[in-house]
Image (tube, rainbow, N blue to C red):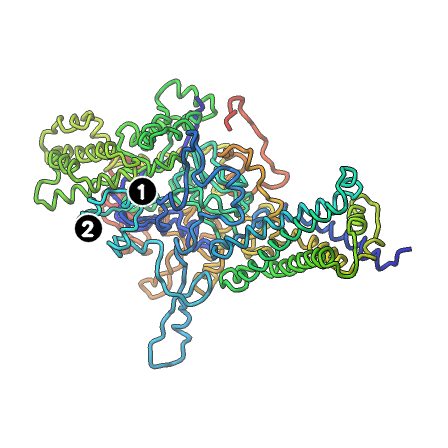
Amino acid sequence: MTPTADIILWVVIPYVCLAFFVLGHVWRYRYDKFGWTTRSSQLYESRLLRWASPMFHFGILAVFLGHVMGLGIPKSWTEAVGMSEEIYHFLAVSIGAVAGVCTVLGLVLLIYRRRTVGPVFRATTRMDKVMYLFLAVVIFLGLWNTIAGSVLNLGGHYDYRDGVSVWFRGIFLLDLHPELMAEAPIGFQLHGMTAMLLFALWPFTRLVHVFSAPVGYMWRPYVVYRSRSDRLGSRAGRRGWERVERRRETSTRL
Amino acid sequence: MRVMAQMAMVMNLDKCIGCHTCSVTCKQAWTNRTGTEYVWFNNVETRPGQGYPRTYEDQDKWEGGWTLNKRGRLQLKAGGRLKNLLTIFSSPKMPSLDEYYEPWTYDYENLTNAPLGEHTPVARPKSLISGQDMNVTWSANWDDDLGGAPELTMADPVLAKISDKVKLEFEQTFMFYLPRICEHCLNPSCAASCPSGAIYKRSEDGIVLVDQDACRGWRKCVTGCPYKKVYFNHKTGKAEKCTFCYPRIEVGLPTVCSETCVGRLRYIGLILYDADRVLEAASVTDERELLASQRRVFLDPNDPEVQREAERAGISRDWVQAAQRSPIWALINTYEVALPLHPEYRTLPMVWYIPPLSPVVDVVGETGEDSEDSGNLFAAIDTLRIPVEYLAELFTAGDPEPVTAVLKRLAAMRSYMRDINMGRAPNPSIPAAVGMEEGTMYEMYRLLALAKYDERYVIPPSHVEQAHGLEELATECSLDYDGGPGMGGSGPFGEGSGVNDPIAVENFHMLKQRQTTDTVADPASRKARVNLLNWDGKSAPAGMFPPRPGPDGANLREPDSVGDAGLVQPRPAGGSVPGPAGSGTDPIPPGGDWLGGDGPGTQGPGGPGEPGDTGASGTGPRL
């Protein structure tokens, strides 16, 4: 029988956090489309940003893909396609370390910039600061797990693909394994827990811009036309008072 | 053929006196908020000069607009779609605040709070960006009237394109003003650069707008626009741009910049164009062909086939009629005196300019020759290479031919009309020398010199069946919208988050706050501002001027207009309240023809008087 504390830590809290994540985004999108932005500070400062921002963002994209690989794909699948433990380990650690170092370096530069450049610091909200704290802790713990666990082999060998990954997938498959997290090294426990808390915060921070990644730009026509009748004046439409569309047959303009 | 309608503007540069009234009123109406301190939807530049932001016309540096790629296809100058997306984390070609200027205010409080001391206290400039003391070293029109010339002016990218010989002669040459708003291009590169698809062109009237709810602050539009007329609001993190005052245009009023233009140099009207030919026109190989190719995109609203196609495209009859009466169509096509600004950017801009003849007239005048004689002027236009080449770099991608042709037409009109004004027989050879009929020339003169309000601004309102919903005419309670009464302030996610307030509600709060506050307007609060958006130019907008002491010393307050914030009603004639025109209005004799009077006081409603300007239409005080 799993202790209650483990159930709370590795079942209840994750579900609560993910509920915040999903419902929070829905609420934020409905309530605050206008506030849904990157809140770029490039206008204030671009010398540091030019290096730090791409380094962080491309790094974190690689880290994300690494997590999809490590958490999302079961060990049996990679073994089925003939990828041995050693090869997987080598790829994960080498690519992961490069991406992780880029991310951390970028993040450190960005935080340094945010703190030292006056106008940028002035434009930082309280929510930004909380978000930076959690993001930094999650990323540092993640990098530490990679370096300490896989490179330096501190505290013996731990294969997260048999532990953390199974627990994580179980959350979505309703196949709960809190005991796997309970026996994971403390570094992984902290990384997982802070990440869950970050997910809970996510919809209330500028991180929402992740979901605005404009991939559709690759395929849409260059110039967008919209009809004025979508909205009258600058007055927002009221629920229950939507216009009855009287489209003429000829109005097939873009 | 796919007919579309485009609201367009022409500015007659000969009439611009560089007073910046358009800029100031535009700023009052649209960008008097934190985050937009440096944003000028309308600005007036002295040319030659660096412009705003500095050297924005240097597209080798800023990579705005379109270019032809190796295969001859049209492509954004800043790069293709993939490159655009890959540089999204740090936009490489975005001007920094240094290229604009660091906005500031003054520490006025120190003037009253400073302790008693030997020296007079001063109000030091404080940066609105960093909050620190700062040195004011640049602003929106720092090089106004050639200030800082020749050193600063030599950085003008347009001047750099002219040959060295011209450069040396430059000090003896000319200056004129160039008011600029968003060009509302037919082929807008800002919209094409927007990864989110938030910038769109309205299909009814071609006005280019930013959807504030869809903009995600990627800043690509700032790079994409070669005119640098999309600005980044650093508080809300969203792009903003000139809106062509669409709430006014929709009800048939001209833009604020046009309404308040002292020189009455702006014309607004519709142009019909063939949307299917836009891409082809923007892709011609030779830059100098772009002027002609853009003209070919426009459709003649008097052509029955165009009318048929317009109807098929859902353009209503009154809009086609407005296109026929459009001063823009006349100036671009009939008289051929208007030219686009920088056609070489390939965006097919829709704010056109009548180039100034005055530099030429001035030179001729200084020689002591007759500066209204067509022969003298024609000769001067041909010999004075400097202004012509400079204007050509601005308006025709460097081709002097069209500029010369326009200047000759303007010169011909000048001397042709002199004969008429002097009571001499008009000389038909003058219009003939520039390929015009006498009647056409006279009509052009009328449009350029005499045209009244309703001839300068031919704006068909959007349709009556929509009028109820347009907030300026709202017959419902203006606070009655989704989200309840917008009580101002910011949402929890930083400046300006949360639901947007409709403009009418913002006006209501502004008026209420201004009437109840005991401090001067605080730019840190987004509600405390005079909003000129719904001002029709008739009387002074409430809150614009402090109440003036009356004859008995008591403060006369403006009548409480909160209840009908959207309406500016003339006061009863015969009042004695001093208006902005200066003196109080005289009582009007009963039954007197007060419209025919010529004094500034006789217009009753205290509006800006237009003395002696009541001839032709004569039906109302606004002409």
The amino acid marked with disc number 1 is: Pro
Please tell me in which quadrant of the rendered image residue B124 appears.
bottom left
- Badge 1: how crowded within 10 Å, few (<14), some, or many (20+)? some
Q: Give whichever of B269, B95 is nearer the camera.
A: B95
Asked whether A67 or B36 is in front, the reply is A67
Residue at image point 60% right, 56% down: B492
User: What chain letter is assigned to the residue under label 2?
Assistant: B
Where residue B13 appears, x then y in whole percent? 27, 42
Mark 2 / mark 1, whichever is N-terminal: 2
Q: Position of residue A190 (x, y in %)?
A: 74, 59
Of residues B243 and A2, which is closer to you in this image? A2
Q: Do labels 2 and 1 share a chain?
A: yes
Which amino acid type is marked by label 2?
Answer: Glu
Left or right position of B233 against A176: left
**Would residue B404 be seen by someone viewing this image from the given angle?**
yes
Tell me the chain of label 1: B
Q: Mark 2 points at which residue?
A: B171
Horizontally, residue A206 falls left or right of residue A66, namely left
Q: How far is mark 2 from mark 1, CA to CA? A: 45 Å
In the displayed structure image, the side of residue A127 where residue B150 appears, left or right: left
Of residues B338 and A149, the one drawn nearer to the viewer in this rendering: A149
Counting from the top left corner in percent of width and height, residue A225 is at 50, 33
